[in-house]
Image (tube, rainbow, N blue to C red):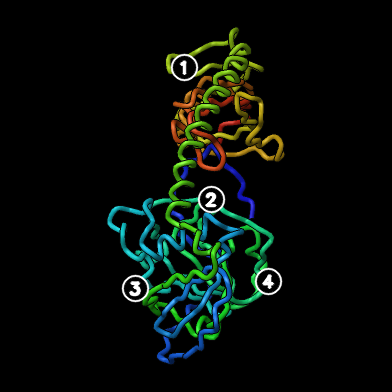
Amino acid sequence: MKNKLNLLLVFLFVIANGYAQKGAKKVVKSKTITTQTTTPKYTEGIFAEFDTSKGKILVQLEYAKTPITVANFVSLAEGTNTTVKNDLKGKPFYNGLKFHRVIADFMIQGGDPLGNGSGDPGYKFKDEFTDAKFEKAGILAMANSGPATNGSQFFITHKDTPWLNGKHTIFGYVVSGQDVVNTIAQDDVINKVVIIRKGALAKKFNASSIFTDYYAAKDINAKIEAEKAEKERAIANEVALKEFATGQTTTSGLKYIVLKEGSGLIPTAASNVKVHYTGSFTSGKVFDSSVQRGQPIDFNLNQVIKGWTEGLQLMKEGAKYKFFIPYNLAYGEQGYPGAIPAKSDLIFEVELIKINSDTKQ
């Protein structure tokens, strides 16, 4: 579901737990029945054998299609992952962990060192979407809290779950032990995970090196992208600031142009106001607009970004101003994840329609 962005209100940040996306259902209570399975002869490939408190589950890993995801899983399982938190290095990551989340007729989820859905290995990595679909039982996929938030948590499905397509990386499938998957209950234990390599190509797959190289390149690329973004921002700002050359600048660095004078009252920082606005980056790209939605918004002036709190107190009811808001008066050095990049200077056209509260000047 696409969330509407309200860039003006105070944001309450909630730590997103890793999860397979599904509406809440009752958790399956633990059972004492143990199911025995017969392990078939291995074909070529890389396999993960889950030795659980209910029996064994054998999964074939798609190392050719999803090399980074498989390298992450295998290196964690074998204790060779060098990117993991220091206190977890050199240890088989999954041994002794629980299936902390089980939803009947949907999936079983494990891989959280904290056992409550919020744990991770100390890093996040990208999605690897392929042509694989959630079209049957026994799909092994990464749990996440949104795009590119993969860590150590995974889940195995009970059935086809097509609503997960394009949201979770599929990196394997059960070849033996689906009956065990179906009997797993919350808090059942993963005694150990054993990685089995069959064939020349599988044996050449160095999970630790592959994931280490990926993460090193990821950091380098992130630095390059940040430098590129900074140069582009500087160029865009230079162009945008020419428009404000004839405007006014406050002591805080807020710049503004009067597009239309108002004739009403002036709000205070404690006022509740009704406004229409269009927000854009200095490149001219619009990121949010009440005008486009056709619906003005109401908010308390002391609950928005600093540039708004200051700027609207310069306006009278009925006025329309255009503001250049430096990033330190907007969303700061961190930006707003998924919407506003770090250190983004912003431009807003704002019309003060009315002051709703009685706190007027």
Name the mark on residue 140. none
Real-space Cα separation, disc 2 to disc 4, in angstroms:
23 Å
**Does dot 3 land on a helix, a strand or a loop?**
loop
State the residue in front, 333 or 76. 76
Question: Circle 2 — which element?
Answer: loop
Q: Earlier in the sequence, mark 2 or mark 1?
A: 2
Vertical side of 345 occupied by 289: above or below: below
In space, the residues marked 2 and 3 are separated at their CA atoms by 26 Å
The Cα atoms of the two marked residues, 2 and 1, are separated by 38 Å
Q: Residue furthest top?
A: 246
> In the rendered image of this protein, does residue 328 appear above or below residue 108?
above
Q: Residue at image x 51%, y 60%?
A: 70
Label of residue 96 in the image: 3
**Label 1, label 3: how far apart the Cα atoms are:** 56 Å
- The answer to whether residue 127 is left or right of residue 73 is right
Residue 210 visible in rendering = yes
Q: Which residue is mark 1?
A: 253
Indicate left or right for 124 with 288 as reference.
left
Q: Mark 2 belongs to which amino acid?
A: Lys
The answer to which quarter of the image holds residue 285 is top right
Circle 1 residues within 10 Å: few <14, some 14–19, many ≥20: some
In the image, residue 262 above or below residue 99: above
For disc 2, the neighbor class at 10 Å (few under 14, some 14 to 19, many from 20) is some
